[in-house]
Image: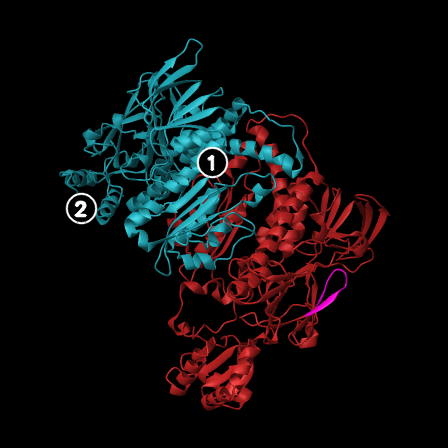
């Protein structure tokens, strides 16, 4: 077995991965031949990427262990196995988004003949409990799956001892040493606290806490302009809370800016307050328990203050690498971001140590990319595969009240890469059929397809703002991956009446200057 | 403008009408070089005499369109002289260069049959055969040519479209944009229950639009139910008010009717709210509501009269039953309802009626959703059954009797088994017939001008440019014979069935059950939603079938349909990153093949 493993490693091209990272490769090979490691694979971090990698490796018949440990947030929130996505990310976020959407549907219902006395109040405790119960069932499910696949699970905090050995410290202080032939770092990231702001750490919460609050956060200030900030502000507003977003500059940096401004425009028209060009300078707790926030308004140069029940920081995330003692293994990180540097095979500067997911420099911070990267890595390590993870044209959706789905290039990026003259943008303002009866405003329902201008007009990017944007975008992401051209998209028959058919009906180019409002059926 | 592609001015633009060219559905991805050249005849017909007949029809269609038609060869100096002559007269010509099309030689043979002239150029002006180069110049000198050119206005219109539904309107508007003088005749014959509606056809008035809005209303009922689990608090029993909903939906439809009228006016299309009927070649009689008759002529016609619901032909059906024509504007709640039929119309209506809390029974003669994937169809049926819809299998109604008048009244339905002698009797408030639709082609004078229809189905056979047996008459929409009435799914199922019957298994089927995240907290059932793709093993696992049962299925399917058009393979699906958490992402992680028989219930995130 060990000989075979060594042979496979040889085939896997260990020596081809020579990186400027000293002679670790040679040393590793010498030790590997001895074959005395506890595990074939040790995964540090039980989030989406780590679990996927571990399960795949186990499926391929390897001896695998996962270590996972959730450092409580400064507010003391902690959770179970499954990582950010399951516990404090995608899953609870989308469920709370759904709760907010239901609020909108309740207001629609009377127009459709349902007799419901308005307004209908919302009970945070009930929602939070239901959401948390679901998350706990997922935690349990992950445990069971690891058990089923004979993956050993340790609830310990891990740090490298050397390049093949990791020390795990359990909650009670008990220590264990685990050694493995291959090690995958998948520790993800945690919300950043703006530590320089007085009171930020003491009184603020982050997305690590919001989904686990037992009581309603009440009047909330969300600081930040990331998708996390806007999603949280969106559902808080949607369940009836007084919510303010404070942002320093532009919303959703990196996303198409026209779409981003439509997203915030929609939020503003649905009750979310925005403080633009402002940065907080201090958070104080008033005698009645409320939080007084002082901020600087950079446009007027004046100082502003306001009181809130909750201040939520959503100003970015930092990789969870501090306690890993990466230097003991010789794993290089980026000096500016502290994220781990890897090559296209996810190998770090130490060839038998890999990193996947949010902890890696330059990777999209998305669950499905981590899952796929983890699975492919295991297949390369133990399944004789050579398939690399393709990080191009990754679709994603921002679950703001009006959802924004996108894949491929933003309009700005397309113009930057190809030049204004070589890019054609098709767009439409449309009205979802479901909006007509309750008379909902559809000013921000918009779809835009960014194409090369030269026939057959290869599609570079698709941007969709409207209900069910994620469901709409997924299939088109595939089309774009298959090299869809504008012509091919136009040849696709619409599904009537849906919102996604607007994509295959895009006829008006921005260049034409014609009105892109869809009229009629 | 000297040369155009030899096609009709495009009845039905892509996107508005369902795809009518099955040959193009998947072909777009690899256009083989030999097909780059224009062809007048479709490669379809098998025997050469059939092909010849087809070509003749095309050529006559071209000539019947009027204007100047020149059959030419690009290198022929005589042809060039003629083209220059017409150009100097400011006449727009349709030029077909016979040396540049694949079937040029055949066209020349057919021209010989039609005109007794084989040489080029061969010139027609407003349907009159002028002859070759010399004759044309003679006609020019004698003034005949100028006279022929000005006979352009012999018809009232370039195009008359009969039927103002999705297909007819898009065709009319497109022709108008291309500078043609166009008329649309639209007239809704009231249903036996007296229901009628405005411009826009089935989709807008009694189809897709009101059906999806009622579907949405039913979904809202479920959303209300869910919302309590998501923390929204109200305790009272929520009831549904049919009148409020119907009024709101009808208001929306009226605004759409108005919009259609407006868009026709904007494009200078003449709209006449009259019943159109052919009386002789190129001539139509239009009868309005008051019975006043007007006659119009046109160079070309498009028939787009669509279909109307079928009746059973049993005692009491037209007197007491309603159809989808009546349901969406019914002024009162239908109450306890029997839906007869198993078409998608039947199941959709039964679904939303049950969603409003009504007692709904579906009477099915044989199978659900004929033509659709039967596994999916069964799952749809069992989901509905779990949600309170009752199914009466293998029964057909034989008599409907009114017990009580009212809004709604009471109807007694007598039904008999299709398998034995058993009969059942039950009382309903409303009986909705959804047993199929018949083409509106039998009372529009088609026989007067010789347009062939399928006597049995009433459908109109057309070639691949939508031309009927009469060269200047075209047809679009639901009345076409042998064309998919709706989705590419129908095409696909037919293909699969044929393979199942005659061929070895070429398919690999991947599938999974899934639990939409939104359903988890709401405590809705797990392992109900289902996704399935079918791949062709011998064509790089190309995806040839795509099926999803779950929320927002339309929104999910659309993009994948575009991807299938681009030659989607299983590998590409696997390489695609999911959008998390959505339902659509299940397609990027399909691992279990059906033949493996492995468990497909979903666990984890």
Q: Position of residue B123 (x, y in %)?
A: 49, 84
Give the position of the N terminus of chain A as an image quadrant: top left
Q: For mark 1, does the 10 Å Cα neighbourhood hold few (<14), some (14 to 19), or many (20 or more) residues?
A: many
Q: Position of residue B60 (x, y in %)?
A: 56, 80
Instruction: Answer left or right for A248 relative to B143.
Output: left
Q: Is residue B240 above or below residue B73?
A: above
Q: Are marks 1 and 2 on the same chain?
A: yes
Q: Which residue is mark 1?
A: A266
Q: For mark 2, does the 10 Å Cα neighbourhood hold few (<14), some (14 to 19), or many (20 or more) residues?
A: some
Q: Which quadrant of the structure image shows residue B180? A: bottom right
Q: Position of residue A116 (x, y in %)?
A: 65, 30
Asked if residue A145 is among those painted magenta in the image, a careful observer would answer no
The answer to whether residue A44 shows anywhere in this view is: yes
The cyan-coloured chain is labelled A
Q: Position of residue B248 (x, y in %)?
A: 65, 42
Instruction: Answer left or right for B591 relative to B191.
Output: left
Q: B305 or B544, which is in the foreground?
A: B305
C-alpha distance separating marks 1 and 2 = 54 Å
Give the magenta-colored segment's residue range: B286-295
Label 2 secondary element:
helix
Residue depicted at x 39% and y 42%: A258
User: Mark 1 or mark 2: which is in front?
Assistant: 1
Instruction: Answer left or right for B38 relative to B450.
Output: left
Label 1 secondary element:
helix
Identify the chain of the residue marked 1, using the numbered disc in the image. Answer: A
Question: Residue farthest to the top?
Answer: A287
Identify the chain of the residue marked 2, using the numbered disc in the image. Answer: A
What colour has chain B?
red
Tag 2 or tag 1, which sits nearer the N-term? 2
Q: Which residue is mark 2?
A: A15
Q: Which quadrant of the structure image shows residue A42? A: top left
């Amino acid at each position: 077995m060990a000989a075979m493993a060594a042979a496979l490693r040889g085939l896997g091209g260990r020596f081809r991965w020579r990186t400027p990272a000293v002679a670790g490769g040679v040393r590793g090979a010498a030790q590997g031949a001895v074959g005395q490691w506890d595990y074939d694979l040790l995964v540090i971090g039980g989030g989406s990427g780590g679990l996927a990698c571990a399960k795949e490796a186990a499926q391929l018949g390897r001896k695998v262990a996962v270590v996972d440990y959730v450092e409580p947030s400064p507010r003391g929130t902690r959770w179970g196995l499954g990582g950010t996505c399951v516990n404090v990310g995608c899953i609870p976020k989308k469920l709370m988004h759904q709760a907010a959407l239901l609020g909108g549907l309740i207001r629609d219902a009377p127009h459709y003949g349902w007799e419901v006395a308005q307004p209908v109040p919302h009970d945070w405790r009930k929602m939070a409990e239901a959401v948390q119960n679901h998350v706990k069932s997922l935690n349990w499910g992950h445990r069971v799956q690891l058990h089923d696949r004979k993956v050993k699970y340790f609830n310990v905090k891990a740090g490298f001892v050397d390049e093949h050995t990791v020390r795990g410290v359990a909650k009670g202080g008990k220590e264990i040493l685990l050694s493995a032939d291959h090690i995958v770092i998948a520790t993800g990231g945690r919300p950043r606290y703006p530590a320089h702001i007085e009171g930020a750490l003491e009184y603020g919460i982050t997305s690590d806490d919001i989904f686990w609050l037992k009581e309603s956060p009440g009047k909330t200030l969300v600081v930040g302009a990331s998708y996390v900030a806007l999603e949280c502000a969106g559902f808080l507003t949607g369940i009836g809370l007084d919510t303010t977003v404070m942002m320093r500059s532009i919303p959703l940096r990196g996303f198409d800016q026209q779409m981003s401004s439509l997203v915030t425009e929609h939020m503003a028209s649905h009750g979310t307050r925005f403080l633009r060009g402002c940065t907080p300078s201090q958070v104080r707790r008033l005698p009645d328990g409320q939080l007084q926030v002082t901020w600087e308004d950079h446009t007027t140069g004046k100082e502003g203050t306001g009181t809130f029940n909750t201040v939520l920081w959503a100003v970015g995330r930092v990789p969870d690498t501090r306690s890993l003692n990466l230097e003991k293994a010789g794993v290089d990180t980026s000096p500016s971001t502290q994220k781990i540097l890897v090559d296209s095979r996810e190998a770090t500067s130490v060839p038998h140590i890999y990193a996947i997911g949010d902890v890696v420099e330059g990777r999209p911070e998305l669950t499905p990319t981590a899952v796929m990267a983890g699975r492919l890595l295991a297949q390369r390590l133990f399944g004789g595969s050579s398939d690399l993870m393709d990080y191009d044209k990754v679709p994603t959706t921002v679950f703001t009240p009006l959802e924004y789905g996108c894949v491929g290039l933003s309009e700005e990026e397309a113009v930057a890469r190809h030049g204004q003259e070589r890019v054609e943008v098709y767009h439409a303002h449309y009205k979802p059929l479901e909006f007509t009866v309750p008379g909902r405003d559809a000013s921000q329902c918009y779809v835009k397809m960014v194409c090369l201008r030269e026939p057959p007009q290869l599609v570079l990017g698709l941007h969709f703002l409207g209900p069910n944007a994620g469901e709409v975008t997924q299939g088109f992401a595939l089309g774009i991956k298959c090299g869809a051209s504008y012509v091919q998209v136009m040849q696709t028959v619409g599904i009537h009446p849906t919102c996604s058919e607007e994509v295959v009906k895009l006829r008006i180019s921005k260049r034409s200057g014609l009105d892109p409002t869809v009229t009629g059926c | 403008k000297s040369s155009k592609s030899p096609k009709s001015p495009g009845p039905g633009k892509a996107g508005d009408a369902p795809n009518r060219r099955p040959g193009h559905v998947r072909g777009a991805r690899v256009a083989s070089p030999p097909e780059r050249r224009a062809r007048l005849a479709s490669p379809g017909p098998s025997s050469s005499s059939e092909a010849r007949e087809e070509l003749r029809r095309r050529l006559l269609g071209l000539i019947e369109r009027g204007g100047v038609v020149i059959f030419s060869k690009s290198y022929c100096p005589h042809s060039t002289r003629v083209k220059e002559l017409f150009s100097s007269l400011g006449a727009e010509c349709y030029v077909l260069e016979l040396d540049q099309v694949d079937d040029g030689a055949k066209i020349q043979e057919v021209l010989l049959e039609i005109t007794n002239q084989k040489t080029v150029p061969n010139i027609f002006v407003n349907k009159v055969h002028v002859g070759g180069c010399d004759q044309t110049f003679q006609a020019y000198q004698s003034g005949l040519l100028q006279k022929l050119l000005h006979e352009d206005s012999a018809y009232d219109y370039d195009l008359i479209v009969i039927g103002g539904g999705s297909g007819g309107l898009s065709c009319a508007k497109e022709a108008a944009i291309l500078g043609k003088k166009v008329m649309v005749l639209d007239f809704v014959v009231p249903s036996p229950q007296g229901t009628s509606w405005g411009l826009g056809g089935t989709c807008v008035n009694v189809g897709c639009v009101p059906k999806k809005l009622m579907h949405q209303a039913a979904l809202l009922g479920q959303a209300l139910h869910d919302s309590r689990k998501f923390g929204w608090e109200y305790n009272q029993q929520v009831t549904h008010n049919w009148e409020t909903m119907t009024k709101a939906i009808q208001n929306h439809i009226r605004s759409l009717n108005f919009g259609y009228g407006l868009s026709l006016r904007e494009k200078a299309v003449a709209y006449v709210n009259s019943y159109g009927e052919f009386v002789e070649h190129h001539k139509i009689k239009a009868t309005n509501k008051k019975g006043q008759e007007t006659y119009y002529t046109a160079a070309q016609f498009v028939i787009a009269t669509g279909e109307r619901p079928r009746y059973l032909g049993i005692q009491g059906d037209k007197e007491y039953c309603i159809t989808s024509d009546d349901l969406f504007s019914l002024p009162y709640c239908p109450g306890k309802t029997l839906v007869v039929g198993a078409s998608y119309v039947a199941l959709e209506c039964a679904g939303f009626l049950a969603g409003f809390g009504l007692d709904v029974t579906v009477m099915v003669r044989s199978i659900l959703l004929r033509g659709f994937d039967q596994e999916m169809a069964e799952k749809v049926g069992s989901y509905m059954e779990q949600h309170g819809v009752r199914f009466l299998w293998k029964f057909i109604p034989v008599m409907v009797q009114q017990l009580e008048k009212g809004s709604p009244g009471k109807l007694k339905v007598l039904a008999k088994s299709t398998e034995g002698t058993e009969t059942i009797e039950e009382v309903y408030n409303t009986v909705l017939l959804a047993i199929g639709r018949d083409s509106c082609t039998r009372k529009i004078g088609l026989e007067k001008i010789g347009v062939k229809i399928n006597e049995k189905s009433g459908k109109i056979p057309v070639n691949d440019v939508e031309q009927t047996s009469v060269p200047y008459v075209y047809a679009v929409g639901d009345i076409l014979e042998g064309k998919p009435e709706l989705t590419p799914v129908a095409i696909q199922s037919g293909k699969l069935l044929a393979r199942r019957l005659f061929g070895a298994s070429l398919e690999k089927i991947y599938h999974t059950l899934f639990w939409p995240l939104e359903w988890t907290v709401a405590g809705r059932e797990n392992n109900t939603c289902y996704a399935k793709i079918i791949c062709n093993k011998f064509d790089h696992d190309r995806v040839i079938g795509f099926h999803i049962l779950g929320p927002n299925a339309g929104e999910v399917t659309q993009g994948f349909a575009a991807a299938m058009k681009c030659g989607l393979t299983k590998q590409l699906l696997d390489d695609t990153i999911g959008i998390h958490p959505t339902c659509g992402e299940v397609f990027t992680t399909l691992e279990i093949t059906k033949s493996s028989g492995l468990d497909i219930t979903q666990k984890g995130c």
